[in-house]
Amino acid sequence: MAEKKVVPGVDYIKEEIKNGLSGVYFFYGDEDYMKQYYLHEVEKAVVGDRTSLNFIRLTGDEFTPGALEEALGAAVMYDFMSLPDADAENEGAQRLVELYEVDFKALKPSDFTSSCKLLKEKLESDTVVIIYSTAGELPEDSKPHQNIIKELSKVSKPVRFPLESDSKLCSWLVRIAAKNKVTVYSDVAGLVIERVGHSMLMLRNEIEKLISYVLASGRNEITRDDIMKITASNKEISPFDFANALMRRDAKTAFYILADMKDRGEEPIMILSTVSRVVGELIRVRGCMDAGMTRAEAASRCGMHEYKVKLYMEQLKNISTSGLFAIAESAKSADLMLKSSPVDSFTVLERLICELVSVN
């Protein structure tokens, strides 16, 4: 069996910045905080800062294939005022073009194709391009967006920023506190993650609030009581929560998640596809659990993030294998109805909920 291709991440872009950047880089993935941090590092390495005449940013509102072609064709601006070493200073000067938060899915297919062609064929050697997409613009769980990620990766050096593991996040929170001469132990930092989620941006905000709070209280250690008092609980709605609610026969939660996905413009066929995919993943993890594998071994075998496997294992404690196959069969029937029936698509999903749960 062919090995699964591993997309480079933080370590790769760190080395690129250190050794010299060139060509097109594509930043995507769930962790926007790290993505933004390394975007700033790239800016410093290539042009110094955003006030440089060699810095061009095309946002979603400004982006068109024509604007991209113009940006790629612009000449590098040299600083002839930095005497007496102007020539030495300008040698190796580069231009940085950022395609910042562009909604590629909203582009006409012909415009998207033209843009990819320009990135492949019209790039000068003195130009560095960063395609910067947030998790909201390019969700990896969405099939249409997966196709966009695939096509952009063909004309760039893709750099994926996944959510960090619990252990890395705990160490990071401990270091932030330590820089402010405040102590937070790893198990306590873990409670922050449980409360807030895995977004490093939100975690940074919460740990800074906690640091300010304990220092203002004349203390230098963050406790569990501090976290429960100061941090706001932020429930992360995971892609598999809908499937889990169905398997728990939890109608209230299932309808809530369905309404949330509907409000966010999720396509019914994609929601159902997610349910089917998640059930398949749960069945694989169940097989690993039955084989006595550890979380790390199961993550490696299934090709999943260890944190996702942890959540799956927790959910599977109260779910039978027969329940997994039952929901798989029901999802298959709903899929056939979506594709062949004139019934409203969300009504089909609501019927699926009613079929699988007991509504009191």
Image: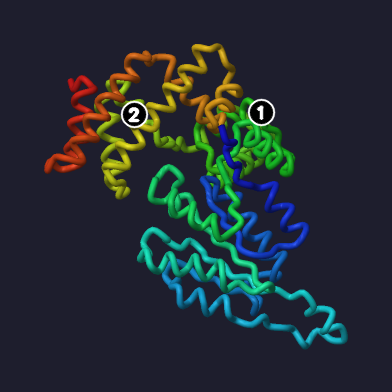
> Residue at the spot x=56%, y=70% of the render?
121
Label 1 amino acid? Ser
Mark 2 and mark 1 residues within 8 Å of each other at the beta carbon: no
Which quadrant does the N terminus fall into? top right
Outermost residue toward the front?
Answer: 1
Q: Please name the residue that numbered disc 1 is placed on.
A: 186
Q: Please name the residue that numbered disc 2 is placed on.
A: 243
> Residue at the spot x=64%, y=74% of the render?
124
> Residue at the spot x=51%, y=76% of the render?
69
Left or right of residue 72: residue 141: left
Residue 192 visible in this rendered orientation of the protein:
no
Left or right of residue 239: residue 93: right
The x, y position of residue 104, in whole percent, is 42, 61
> Residue at the spot x=58%, y=48% of the render?
160
Nearest the viewer among 236 and 150 is 150
The x, y position of residue 133, in whole percent, is 50, 56
**Who comes first in sequence, dot 2 or dot 1?**
1
Q: Quadrant of residue 137?
A: bottom left
Disc 1 residue crowd, few under 14, some 14–19, many 20+, Cα 10 Å: some
Label 2 amino acid? Ala
Q: How far apart are marks 2 and 1 (CA)?
A: 32 Å
Q: Residue 26 carries which label?
A: none
Nearest the viewer among 106 and 315 is 106
The x, y position of residue 315, in whole percent, is 43, 21
